[in-house]
Amino acid sequence: MTAPTAPSLQTGSVRLVLLVAQREIMARLRTKSFLISSGILLLLVLGGIIFGSVTASTPDNPRVAVTDTALLHGIDVVDPVPVDSVEEAEQLVRDGDVEAAVVADSSNDLGLRIIADSTEPRSLMLLLSQTPPVELLQPDAVPGGLAYLVAFGFGIVFFAAGMSFGPTIAQSVVEEKSTRVVEILLAAVPTRVLFTGKVLGTSVLAFAQIALIAAMAIVGLTVTGQDELLVGLGAPVLWFVVFFVVGFVLLASLFAATGAMVSRQEDIGATTTPVMMLVMIPYFLVIFFNDNPLVVGIMSYVPFSAPVAMPLRLFLGTAEWWEPLLSLGVLALTTAALIGVGVRIYENSLLRLGARVSWREALAAR
Amino acid sequence: MLVRFRNVEDDKGGFMLQIRNLDKRYGTRQVLTDVSFDVLPGRMTGFVGGNGAGKTTTMRIILGVLSSDAGTVSLGGVPLEAGGRRRFGYMPEERGLYPKMKLQEQLVYLARLHGLSTEHATRNARELLERLGLGERADEPIEKLSLGNQQRAQIAAALVHDPEVLVLDEPFSGLDPMAVDVVVGVLADRAAAGVPVLFSSHQLDIVERLCDDLVIIADGRIRVAGPRTALREQHATLRYELLTSADTAWLRDQPGIDVVEFDGDYALFDATDDDAVQRVLREATARGAVLSFARQHPSLAQIFKEVVQ
């Protein structure tokens, strides 16, 4: 009897990983809840952009009666209505045809007087008042409000992806355990292949959803004429994408591994909560401390918050050119190490049905 | 390492599955001790044992989903490495497929995981579904199938990739007699094509009807392994049944005869040798008409009890 020959498994492994990933994606795309939640998310983004464009569009300038248009020299946010006399101006104000009137008056230093109906037109008063020139020695590169918005934007995208797709992959792992199909799968493919395929499939779905949202946001902002918001975000957004891809694979691996430790969907929370915390805590730290350079600086190197904090620093211009590279290196190394740990937990836990697998058992070397 | 086998269609000689000196303990509990047996190509090997005797553990180790503390599993003389079981067909004791996936789609997926092309996988899935009477259910999700049909689907999942070795844990549990016949037919075909088939069952009558070889395990140790016929010979006794037109009480006084059961004209007895048997037959015909005189073969259930005790 001739001995069986043993060809290489290399090319086969890649094919199998893709096959597992493909099933993962198809299964998810067929669930109604996924399609509905994705649709809602897209509508929310679109709605936000439209809402922003409606509220931001400037209303018509207020009409102001003037006896001499030179009085409003240098002020272009009002609609001057020339009149011949002070009486005519007063009449227009009384009739409500204009918000107020500005008439020449040599009895004060300003050489003019405002006529209004019942309340002082404060905005007009400010426009006509004189302000001394101000020189800032250290001007802020970015207004504080915008920094908060960007931090919030990066944060919510990473947070939402982690919170929605993380538990999804954990559920998918538990489904294979609770329906026992895992034993057939493991008889056919190595554990690593199954793990890699599931993480890859879920990650691809997450990236696709985020990319769709981003494309929708960019198109929406451009169409509604708000594209000035995009200026200056280009490079930080590209960095965010790179960090997001690596950081999400890290999260997905941890969710897959901790999901494998339980046998029933109801028990998922017990082991995935620590991973949940790893998603949530950095998110809140970056949001709340986005104006604290020390905290943001530290967070930009901590692997779980780097995908949010480092692009924020790049946007604020507080990071040197080499810093994102270093941070990305730290993140990539951590991801590689934790995938190793994840595969071990997964291997140790997958066939342990019934009671929850303890952390010690899950991490034990085989 | 992936192990490629000879195409079983070329010749009817597949590879022998050899299990050697398996030890396994869970914590302090020893569940397998020095388990060794062979599963020959082209033969159906029944694997019998009580609950917790170690059948499922042994099968999981053969499939590589569980690692043993010691011992080897080899095919055609080559020890199996992790991942070397892609041409194995496995039906685990814990049944389960993806509940929401459509039947045929799921079979095609599993066949592709085992290395088949999509076309080949689809063709095999269709054929199996037709043969198992599930042709009309091909596009239904597993969770919509009746329990009996889910069981058939599970068998299809074990066979869809043209496995060259079959390991089936309780393949007949939950099947009605008709379905048992269908599955027996499918398995017999595979065995006839040179595939070694190992199956466990607690339905000893089915095992008795079906298997060529028998392995009996108790408390994690192999008690008996070998051809069923040889086992039967080995455990055969000179037990006879006698039914006459007259009373059979005289049997008690015959030398070399031990009456096991007695009921007027009926008796069941053990004889010490063939001469004693012939004497009884002569005596019986002299005393009246002999309606029935037959040797009793021990059933598998009897052998099993004897071996396990």
Image: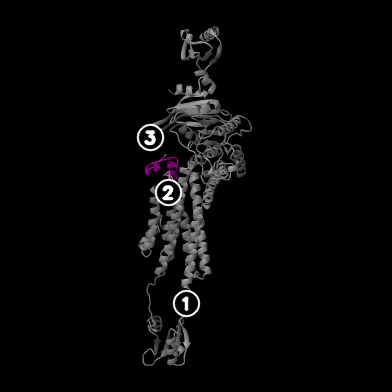
Q: Nearer the viewer, residue A284 or A297?
A: A284
Q: Provide the chain ID for the residue under circle 1.
A: A
Residue A260 sits inside the magenta stretch:
no
Q: Secondary structure at mark 1?
A: loop
Q: Provide the chain ID for the residue under circle 2.
A: A
Residue B286 sits in which quadrant?
top right
Amino acid type of the residue tagged 1 in the rendering? Pro
Q: Is residue A195 above or below residue A313?
A: above
Q: Secondary structure at mark 3?
A: loop
Amino acid type of the residue tagged 3 in the rendering? Gly
Residue plotted at (48% across, 24% down): B301
Label disc, if present, on residue A338 of the rendered structure = 2
Residue plotted at (46% across, 15% down): B260
Label disc, if present, on residue A59 of the rendered structure = 1
In this rendering, do the residues under marks 1 and 3 share a single chain? Answer: no
Q: How many marks?
A: 3
Residue B45 coordinates in the image, percent (x, y): 53, 28
Q: Which residues are magenta?
A: A340-365
Between label 3 and label 2, give the one nearer the viewer. 3
Label 3: which residue? B27
